[in-house]
Amino acid sequence: MQKTISLKLLPSEAANDTTIKKYIAKAEAIKVPAISGFTILKQSIDARGRQPWINLSLKAYINEPFQQREMIALDFKDVKNAERTVIITGAGPAGLFAALQLIESGIKPILLERGKDVRARRRDLAILNKEGKVNPESNYCFGEGGAGTYSDGKLYTRSSKRGDINRILNLFVYFGAEENILYESHPHIGTNKLPHIITAMREKIVACGGDFLFEKKVADILINADKITGVKTSDGNVFEADAFILATGHSARDIFQLLNSKKLLIESKPFALGVRVEHPQALIDSAQYHCQVRGDFLPPASYSWVQQVDGKGVFSFCMCPGGIIAPAATSPGELVVNGWSPSKRNNPYANSGIVVTVEEKDIQVFKQHGPLAAMFFQQSVEQRAFEAGGGKFAAPAQRLVDFTENKLSSSLPGCSYLPGIRSSSLTDVLPPVIHKSLQQAFKDYGRKMRGYYTNEAVVVATESRTSSPVRIPRDAVTLQHPQLKNLYPCGEGAGYAGGIVSAAMDGEKVAKQIITILKAT
């Protein structure tokens, strides 16, 4: 007999399988030996009261053999000599999952990635952190796996209507992620583990006969009437295919400019911009778990908040418990910060983006740039941040209370940002509509979360790559660009996703549509 059982346990109890079986037996009024095993279906933390609890939903096997968790069936085909081919520009989550979906239908994907593989990419990141030199083609945004590879690996999404979340998570497990991502309420892989998983995905694509080409930056799109005939890379090679997926990520400004120069429809879209704030992790633990010291059986605490300040949305973004602030710029002379955490989340700091929505009315000074107005607004703030940091990617920073009171910090606390931070007035970096909204939001949230509003925290500028400032339009049904029948804008860079899972789902969605169209012709 299989029974679904809900339990509310202390963290120490939830970490012990023997104890969990005792609670199952008590709930079902049976003996413990009758329980052959159990599978966790859902797991979450309830920290609203003085005592944190772990909520578990379990499938228990009673008086019958235990069965391992059933995984999804996968059918990767040999596509080396497939008649149909699809070029995918960009090997981030959208591109990778689109490629895997195509292979399951017998269509050959050709991935063109402007950056390097994860191993070579890691060396470029080390140079950026230690020497303050950015490689425009190989950095925290560009390279195998896209921005997600070195951006924490959080797999939580609210975009359940966009696709099959369970399939995406199961694919991650198939390629090496731990099974806990299948049941935790906020699944997370960790930046230290993601590169191995991304490499396994690439190896599968190549083993099945797909092409995976690095340092192939798309420089031109070749068009005949209402179709693309090929793409030309910066090394002069031309690649042809039946269909073309554009999955270049939120930072591919050259692609946005290329489309605009060819008078192909693109649109300016709202995005968000602000700062990354870092606290001692122990402070966040104390506030969220209502304790002096976090227990051994609780993970480092996180937080999330959304509020309105004079009609502007202010919200936390990509919160990283036990994390590190990283330099995420893609060009010299621009400063961008992001955050990530290793799988154990065992660093001494907690950081989060705190950002403000940027709307059309906020970027009127750049309206001469048409659909690229938001992009140029974003770039201008990043350039001011670089100048305020003094070069080599040192980041301008203020203590949190000093920031809200417009005081230049006489000293700065310890910070995880490896290129270093420099005391600066962030009101000189951020547009007034941004810094004023942030100042009020920090004060308001400080009244809600004990200890949050403190000069032990440091505010670092600038968090500006929350999403693409450009949308590449596509038909709601065919998913094709309005002017080009075989171009499929996809993922975060095209404006249709906002994280690893939603981008992966969009990649699969686009691939399925291409499969349907190609099989019909």
Image (cartoon, rainbow, N blue to C red):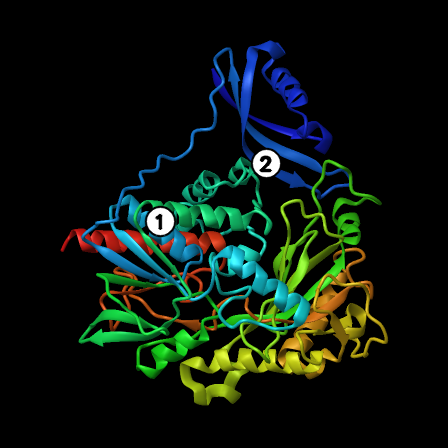
CB of mark 1 within 8 Å of CB of mark 2?
A: no
Quadrant hosting residue 24? top right
x and y percentages locating residue 257 in the rendered image: 40, 79
- The 10 Å Cα crowd at callout 1, few under 14, some 14 to 19, many 20 or more, is some
Type of amino acid at the residue the image marks with label 1: Val
> Furthest residue to the left?
521
Pick the front one: 465 or 173: 173
| Residue at x-position 77% and y-position 59% | 452
Q: Is residue 220 above or below residue 14?
A: below
Pick the front one: 45 or 343: 343
Q: Is residue 180 left or right of residue 102?
A: right
x and y percentages locating residue 362 in the rendered image: 54, 81
Q: Is residue 476 left or right of residue 169?
A: left
Residue marked by disc 1: 206
The quarter of the rendered structure image containing the C terminus is bottom left
Residue marked by disc 2: 43
x and y percentages locating residue 90 in the rendered image: 40, 62
Q: Is residue 238 visible?
A: yes
Q: Is residue 26 above or below residue 480?
A: above
Q: Is residue 156 visible?
A: no
Type of amino acid at the residue the image marks with label 2: Gln
